[in-house]
Image (tube, grey):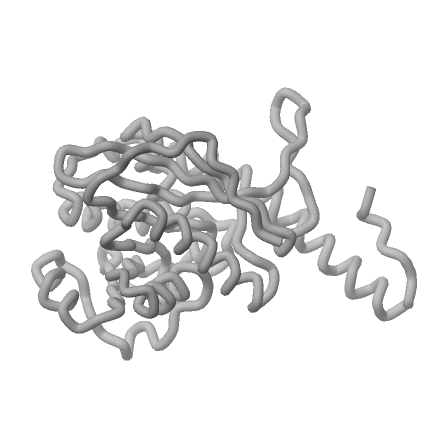
Amino acid sequence: MIETIYLEEPKLNNVIMIEGLPGIGNIGRIAAGYLVEKLKAKNFAELYSSDFFPSVILQKDGIARLLRIEFYYYKGEKNDLIIVIGDTQASTPEGYYDLSNAILDVARKFDVNLIITLGGLAREEFSGKPRVVGAVNNEKLLERFKNYEIIFDGNLVGSIVGVSGLLVGLAAIRGIDAISLLAETTGFPIVIADPIGAEAVLRVLMKILDIEIDLSELEKEARELEKKIKKTEEFQKRMIKEILSAKEENKEVSYIG
């Protein structure tokens, strides 16, 4: 079950969608979340899925809420933006496809003409500042983005797992241009935030969008996000361990309720 709830249906023109969900080094989530904050983008829709982990997030005021994906919009001078951020990705392969198609349904509803997904490229080691590696879903985009300091080399990536990759592939079937921007990072676990990689992605993104945002507070925001995601990740790991243990012993799982 996936349900997208619209809080508002804004009128948007010349729309670019930017996706940044939790992943390697949390680069996409940090970059997209920072963009939402600095542009003061407005939340207009929320997506809920039964394929998310069966848990809720307890907020500071003591109110619990379900895990969700959020859609924000920003009306710019050249392009209006839809920015997709969220608490989690799916928990099964089928769920990843369903989630990606649900996001593409929103893209189609608002006539998005380009999707940009943000993420990290895990490397055991690299020197200097992280490079940004790109992947596109049609040949004409290679020419369009050749002057943006993006490396197009399939030998560096091989494959892109998760929503950031599936959106690019599935968008091609729907006739939507899409590019994935991946910053090199050594932050393998999701719970390790990499603001340096997020900054590298944002610098390329700002050039593509022809906008300027202040990046001076990026690391501070990344650390705060890291704490929140770490709590969710630790709970999910405990939950998975208990589920597997319960299956082996053929007993009920105690985390529910």
Across and down, in percent, residue 203 comes to 20, 46
Instruction: Residue at 33%, 30% (x, y): give it.
Output: 41
Q: Left or right of 8: which side holds 114?
A: left
Locate residue 242 relative to residue 176 in the image: left or right. Answer: right
Q: Is residue 170 left or right of residue 242?
A: left
Q: Is residue 159 visible?
A: yes
Of the pair 194 and 21, the residue shown nearer to us: 21
Residue displayed at 41% across by 40% down: 71
Q: Quadrant of residue 232?
A: top right
The spot of residue 108 in percent (x, y) is: 34, 52
Residue 128: where, in percent of width, then height? 22, 58
Of residues 251 and 179, which is closer to you in this image? 179
Q: Quadrant of residue 199?
A: top left
Whether residue 122 is visible to the viewer of this picture, yes or no, is no
Quadrant of the drawing holding the N terminus: bottom right
- From the viewer's side, name the closer residue of 58 and 104: 104
As drawn, 199 above or below 102: above
Q: Is residue 23 above or below residue 157?
A: above
Q: Give x and y (percent) for residue 201.
A: 26, 51
Q: How many marks?
A: 0
Image quadrant occupied by the C terminus: top right
Q: Residue 215's quadrant in the figure?
A: top left
Q: Is residue 211 left or right of residue 100?
A: left
